[in-house]
Image: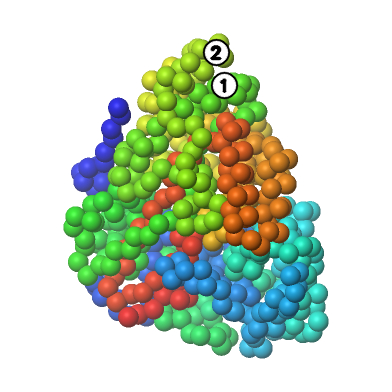
Amino acid sequence: MLHLSVNRRRFLTGAAAGAAALSLRPGLSYAVEGDTLFVRAASDIEILDPAFQNGLLEEEIGRCLFVSLNRLDDMRTGVHLRPYAARSLNQTSPTEIAFELNDWLVWTGDFGPVTAEDVKYSFERVANPANGSAWAYAFDALREVEVTGTRTGIIHLKAPSAPFPATSLPYYMGHIVCKKAVEAAGGKFTTEVPASAGPYLIDKWVPKQSVALTLNPAWKGEPPAFPRVQFQIITDDEAAALAYESRATHYSRISLNTLSIYKDKLPERTTLIQHSGNRFAWIAININNPKLADPKVRRAIQYAIDVGQIMDGSYSGLAAPATGVVPPALIGHREAILYPTDAAKSQALLAEAGVSGLSLELAAMNDKTSQLTCQIIQALLGSVGITVDIKPYDEGVYWTLGDKSAGDTWKTLDLVLMNFAGGVDPSENLTWFRPKQIGIYNWSQFDSPEFEALYNEGMAQTDPDKRGAIYRKMQDLMEESGGFVFITHETFAAVARQGLEPCILADGYVDVTRFRKD
């Protein structure tokens, strides 16, 4: 058995890498005082355009700059949708959603009021395959947005879609952009936002250090509790914990290693937040790689990997092995995997395939949890005769590996340790493995017409029991392909200063516009 641990000394050694973050806000008191909210960010910004953004900090800042027709509440209160940019939002038929925008919403830069034409442009721009948005899947059900007045319109769907209001409208791909401003900017933008209508504006961006926001004077909605927000960019989890302990942030997401430490001794005047998360991790096995083309070899890899050891070594025993990509809280969760750990079966399958001396590369991001997981996988596969070469990558490079628009690396990948934010509906977790996602986010190159047909059936099905059966079958197909080893749905953990009530969404990202002082 392989056992790995990270002790307090190693924790502090790694955290020293975040020393620069501590100088950004020295002397912050334990209490939440003043007009500025300081929040840890796990990445920098690259693209703020909702149609093309990558996620992480871009999503969190996007919620400050833009508005959506509706929005979800804090994940700890359950799945509740509330109108936001929409004054009213009503499902008038199984395929029609009527909306009316608030009459006080205006664009910056003298672009006038937010209109139904802006909503139409925003949604159809993402949905249009010619624009190459990775988030087009969210509008697969969309036929068109009909403009019925300056601020009124009707969203027409191709067919009934049970998850659409919760999975497409409140997320970043549902953020409304200004048609006139975006077209004037050439049809898309990166970090220079041509016009926005949300509660905040970007005041100052220091790349790789911080992003500061200030109130939008034209905002007439519910005022945020903090006139200023500063995201401190601290990519290393251990450095983020040290920054919090040094009072450089009011709120910070933490690793499970840090959670295990804080369970024994919590920093003073701190609220510990722990919740069953929707973020899921798995190993993608490239089905089309010649070394992995034999299903027996892929099945051998599945049998060889003891996920329980990963839970102990990488997640400090604070997470549970996954049975698929749908977590226990959602319909479609499976009770068990099809191919549990069995090293003897793994070795027998390799022998049947006539394979010996197999050497594979395992790509992963270079954060500590990922690298610990890779080391455990390396040892487990090594015990059945498979040599694993770990390839760590910075986040920016990592996400180009399986992207066909960035070159041909996607064709030659062996194994990849992957990690995605989940959603409030199982369709959000399953959409990434459809055939159309090959060369985008389906890095296993899992190509199943049956999977695609079931996905479309599940989207139109309104009976929860029938939907659940559909989604369990889809995960069976994934595992049967030999292209996946499911690892975990990561436990969400964060810390906040006492007196601060954060708003945490289902994907683990925060909405700082709804942070409150207690």
- 474, 463: nearer the viewer: 463
Is residue 114 or residue 135 the one in the foreground?
Answer: 135
User: What residue sits 56% from the left and 67% below the top?
Assistant: 62
| Residue 375 quadrant | top left
Q: Position of residue 474 (x, y in %)?
A: 62, 44
Residue 480 can be seen in this image: yes
* Relative image position of residue 94 (x, y in whole percent): 74, 70
- Colour pattern of the rendering: rainbow
Residue type, mark 1 in image? Lys
Q: Position of residue 417 (x, y in %)?
A: 49, 38
Q: Secondary structure at mark 1?
A: helix
Q: Residue 296 got which mark?
A: 1
> Which label belongs to residue 352?
2
Residue 201 visible in the shown view:
no
Picture quarter with the C terminus: bottom left
Nearer to me, 56 or 169: 169
Please indicate whether residue 133 sits to the left or right of residue 2 in the image.
right
Of mark 2 and mark 1, the one earlier in the sequence is 1
Q: Quadrant of residue 3?
A: top left
Bin the neighbour count of mark 1 within 10 Å (Cα to Cα): few under 14, some 14-19, many 20 and up. many
- Residue 345: x percent and y percent? 46, 21
Q: CA distance from mark 2 to mark 1?
A: 8 Å
Of residues 372 and 93, the one drawn nearer to the viewer in this rendering: 93
Is there a contact, CB below 8 Å, between mark 2 and mark 1?
yes
Please tell me which residue is depicted at 63% across the width and 75% down the height of the picture.
69
Under mark 2, the amino acid is Glu
Who's the residue at 35% across and 80% down the image? 517
